Every structure is written in C-alpha cells, then in structure tokens.
Amino acid sequence: MKVALFVTCLVDLMRPSVGFAALRLLEAAGCEVVVPESQTCCGQPAFNSGDRRAAIALAQKTIAEFEGFDYLVAPSGSCADQIRTEYPGLFLDDPDWRRRAEALAARSYELTQFLAEVLKVASVPGEFDGSVTYHDSCTGLRSLGIKHQPRRLLGKVRGLSIKEMPEAESCCGFGGTFAVKFGDISAAIAERKCVNLQAAAADAVVGGDLGCLINIEGKLRRMGDETTRVLHVAEVLAGTNGKLV
Amino acid sequence: MRSQAMFFQRRAGEALADPQLQRNFTGLRDKFVGMRARAVNAYERDFDELRDAGQAIRDRVLDNLDVWLELFEEKATQRGATVLWAKDGREICEQVVAIAQKHGAKKVIKSKSMLSEEAQLNVALTAAGVEPVETDLGEYILQLSGNEPPSHILAPAAHKNLDEVADLFAEKHGKPRKSEIQALTREAREALREHFLSADMGLSGGNFLIAETGSVALVTNEGNGRMVTTLPKVHVVITGIEKIVPTLEDFATLMRLLPRSATGQEISNYVSVCTGTKGVDDSDGPEHTYFILVDNGRAGLVGSEFQPMLRCIRCGACMNHCPVYQSIGGHAYGWVYPGPMGSVLTSLYTGLENSLDLPHAATLCNQCGVVCPVRIPLPELLRKLREKQTECGLRPWPERLALSMWAWIAQRPGLYSLATKIGVRYLNWLAGGEDRIKVLGLAPEWTAGRDFPAPQGRTFKELYKQGQERKT
C-alpha cells in the first residue's frame, strides 16, 4: 500500500516533528510512505479568505502531485477536509478536474481516521507517562467526524490516561487568518479553551491540528502556564512526544 | 436601522474590555447552550431527521415562493384581512402610519418584530404623532433605556443584567427599587396593562405565515402577543415574505424545532394562530387585520447561492453557540441581526461594502451549522460572502497583496522551499533561543493576547531531504 504523506504547510514550517511522527506511524503500520517533494499548501488559507482562483490553482497542484498514490494522509483534520470535502466543489464547471478531485478526495484521510478506520491498527509505538486531555478541532470533528478515533488510538499508548476537559468540542479561536484579523476576539476564545483544558488537570493537551495547538500553546504560556505540555496526537502515538528525532 | 457594521472591530474591542458585559455574556451562554442540549437529548426521536424535515419544508416554499405568497394572499383576504406589500423599510413605515391615521390610532402596542427594527418603525410612528409601546419585556426594557438596539433576536436585552434593569425601572417608573425578577416583571406588567387597555392598534411580527389558511402564527413566552393581537380593534402584522409555510401540519413540524432550538423548550408558553378578523360569533379579536409582507432585500436572494439563508426561522441557536458572539455579544455586529445569521443578513441586506468585517469575523468552526434547525450552511455562506468581497475588489490592498504573493510562491515549490527556509530562520532569530516569540512584528495582533511558539528550527522538507541523503 503506497501512502503519500501530505505534511501540511504549518507542520513543514513550525513543527517538523509532527511530520516525522506521522511517517513513523504509517511505516510502523506497514505502509510504504512517499513524501512528494514539490508539495506546499492545500490552498485552504486562500479558500477561506475568499480567493477562489488561488484556491483552485493550489488544488490542481496538489491533485497532480498526489493522485498517483493509493492514499493521501495528512496530520490535520482541516487540511484533510479541504482535500476531501472542498476540492470537488472547486471544479463545478470543469468535469475533468472535478473527476480528478473526486478521485483524490475519496482516498484522502486525516491521520487518526486513517490509522483507526482504514489500517485498523491494533497497536501503536507510543509511550507516555502521564495524562492527556484531547481538544477536538472543529473541522475534523464536525466535517470528518473525528472524535473517537484519536481517543481510541491514544488508549493504546502505554502509560497514558485520558482526562476529558469541559467543552472539548468548543472552538479554540484559531480560525486561520481570523487569529490575526481579529486577534483580540481570537485570544478571548483561546482563553476560555485554556481555562477548560486546565480544569482537566492533565499533563498534556493533545490535538490533531497544529493551528489550534499553536494557538493554545501561545495562550497557555501567556497565561503563565509553563507546565501543561501541548502535543500533536501523532507525536504521542509515535512516542516522540514533541521531540525531533 | 442604519447599519453600524463598519465599526465592528472597534465595538467588539469595547465589548471585550467591559467586565460587566463579559459576566453577563457568560451566564447567558451557559444557559442557552445547556437548555438546547437538554431539549435535543430529551427529544424522543432523531432530532437530525427533524432538521431534515424542517429544511425540506422551507426549501419547498422558497423554490416556489411567489405561488405560496399568492395562495396566502387569497386565503387571508377571504378571511377579511387586508394584504399589503412593502418593498423596503420606508414603505413599511408609510403603510403603518397610513393605517394608524385611517383608524385614528394614537397609541400602538407592539409585540416583538425584528422587521420593525429593520425599518426603524418607532421613529416613523413617533414622528407621525403615534406613540409606540413595546410590550415584549426585553424590548420594553430597551425602549425605556433610551431606545437601545437589541443585542439578541430572542432576548433583546440579553446584554443587561438584573441590577441594571432594577436601576432602570426605579428611575423610569418612579417606584421603590426592586431586586427580584418576579417583582420587576410584575412592575412592568402593571405599567404595560394601562397601555394594553388604552391602545388603538396592535402591531406584531409573525413567526410563520400559513398559506393554506391565510393565518399568522406567533410564538411567545410572555403572553403579550395575545394582548397585542386581540385587544385593539386593529391588528397589523409585519413579516418578511420568506416566513411562509404551506400547511398547518408543516407549521406543527417547525414548532417541534423552533422552541427546542431557541430556548430548549418543548413548546413555548404561548402559540397563537391568528386568522382574519373577528367573526360574528367570536368574543374577541380585531375588527381590522392587515398583513404587511416585506421584501427589504429578501426577494433578491431567491434563486441565488444565498437562498438557503431564507430558510431561517429566527431561533437564535447560531448566535447562542457562536464563540465570537459569546465573546462580544450582539451590538458589535451593528445592525438588527447579530451572530452568524446576522453576519450573512447584514451583508446581504445592507451592502457588502458596509459590512466588510462581518463575514470574516468567524472562525468557521461550524458550531452554528450543526445546531441550525433548518440546516443553513452558515460557514459556507460566510465564505461565499468573502469570495464576493474579493470579486468586488473590496478587501484592503495589503491583505490582497500578501495573499497573492503567498499564493504565487506556494505554486512554485523551489521558491516556496527557499521562502520557508528563510521564514523559519527569521522566526527563530525573533525567538532568540527561547521557546516562544513575545512580539511578532509581522502579526502584532497575534502576540497582543498570546505568545507565538517558536518553530523547531528547520523545515520538514529540509530535514527529510537530509535524512534521505544520509540513507543513500
């Protein structure tokens, strides 16, 4: 099974350890993993900013790069959803590209969904000595139905216990460019998320989307919380726990 | 009401900085969200199937709106009502004033009507020498408080707390200050009773218009709607043309959705279906009934990509569940309707160019979409409005330039790799060896309220390539 890893632009820039963790998880599950070298961004920032032309151009680029593999897997619910749910709609007037978009969409997955539902992995390499609380990122949760998959997988990590936070399904306030366009509102929403996750009194907050995690970590540290670790679910499942190895 | 949506950014900031407002919002948020969740869980069947049915009813109407409106007009006229059509707020005001003058009305009692807010009807009535009296408790509070605009479509005075209302009543009613909700509502009731008995005309909105019977349905919790529609000799109903439903059975289906979504009630305290004028055997009811069916931008949405917005049954669930609305309340949105549905309606009804911030003031979390009883894809509509702004060249040029440059580079992998390599090093230099950046020069809005975690130092692509080279 040939799986192409869609690294995502945020992981590429901010936290390569997430990409390597995803790679490790997929390989441990027996996949042949390819990382197409020319990949950049799925185009979601353009799509959500109302620049449809740029969104289409980046979608075409991504489709061409990834359509030759059995699966596309991304360590992000919102990037996976852009490809899976939104790409076909970008080509309503273009039957050829629409077919290609639909073909890729059907084979594109968020990482934990892929591990849990397609590969149905029985075990994961991870080890974590402590408790985690899981933040459900909006797009993954409400568009892709990612809720129990990461929790089930985290349950297989040796030493790890899960403590649910209140309002786990509430938005963290990131929202892409929203976080900068309306920085004050965004930070206010993030504060509420942080108060909720602190109430779980877990050693780490874990999530599946780096955008949310950057927002949450930034707010936690500004609030003076130096102890709650902020980790991507791939890092915990792979056992790298935030380290670049 | 003239839109103030262009001041969104500033007014949102003011709301965030007001500790009393913030406390009021917290209580409200927990109440509305909790009540809906309990009602949906307690519903004996699948609530999502009910939402499908609600959507189907609304779509059926909107796909042939003209036909249903004609049927409504025919049935309502048969029952003795007069059906008038208003194209905009000005025409609403002209027609209501003309009706008041025709019947010599000096005082009009009103139950809640958001369209009356759209038209600024109270201003027009007052100018014509007719006294408007708001009888919905929330609207009454706002009228006493110097005609404040509503901040929520169900609970217009949601931004005020008990103490503020107690102070207001003590000042305006000239009675000893009361501090309990029951005592305050009793005092309002006493003040309103005189108005109910002395008014010449009643004015209401309408939750639904029922085509097969020519009726208006009113869904209220306070009973004031009953007074307004039965006591005076004249009853005027103002509603948008989209509020129509084909049959009473359709109305019943939507009534399973509306109170549960709005206030978490299985059924509201009062549901009134008013048809025509007082009949010979009726003990009460108006002698004259007028329907003013209003366009004010709605017809332009029919058949467009924004038609799904017209499904809206005004339950308020989208704003109750919106993290942005929960943080800033309703006034920052600047017009009649706040929250996600308001951001769409204000843009469409008052002009894209006057509401530049509204479609962007959302995280697109889709909490609104999943609670909407008629499945309006609100995030999708907000995104479409963003596209419209871009198409019309309405976005500020620095934003357009940045986005174009980024998109241009992202289509060129070699250049993109170089740019990200430089970017990651720049960010690391800013962090100065720390694990975070305290002030981000390129995005100070981010670091005003939180830190920006430092990147790990190299891009994934760089590290991956190094790893591959080592292997070979």
Image (spheres, rainbow, N blue to C red):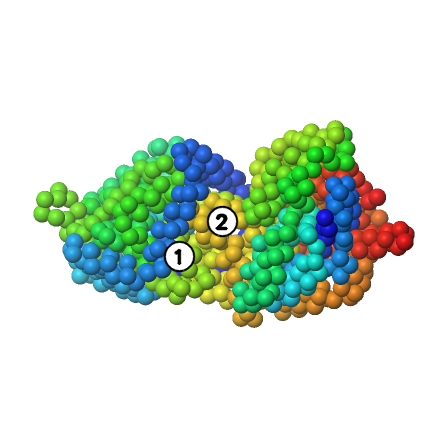
Q: Which of B312 and B137 lies nearest the eye of the viewer?
A: B312
Viewer can see residue B250: yes
Q: Which quadrant holds residue B138?
A: top left
Q: Is residue B426 above or below residue B195?
A: below
Query: Which mark identifies residue B310?
Result: 1
Residue B352, percent from left and from top:
49, 65
Q: Secondary structure at mark 1?
A: helix
Residue A14, percent from left and from top:
76, 51
Residue indicated by mark 2:
B369
User: Is disc 1 surrounded by few (<14), some (14 to 19) or many (20+) residues within 10 Å?
Assistant: many
Q: Which of B216 and A7 lies nearest the eye of the viewer?
A: A7
Q: CA distance from mark 1 to mark 2?
A: 14 Å
User: Which amino acid does the dot numbered 2 rest on?
Assistant: Gly
User: Which amino acid does the dot numbered 1 rest on?
Assistant: Leu
Q: Is residue B283 left or right of residue B425?
A: left
Q: Quadrant of the N terminus of chain B?
A: bottom left
Q: Which quadrant holds residue B157?
A: top left
Q: Is residue B53 above or below residue A44?
A: above
Q: Residue furthest left?
A: B280
**CB under 8 Å between callouts 1 and 2?**
no
Q: Residue shown at 58%/47% (left/top)?
A: A144
Q: Residue shown at 33%/56% (left/top)?
A: B61
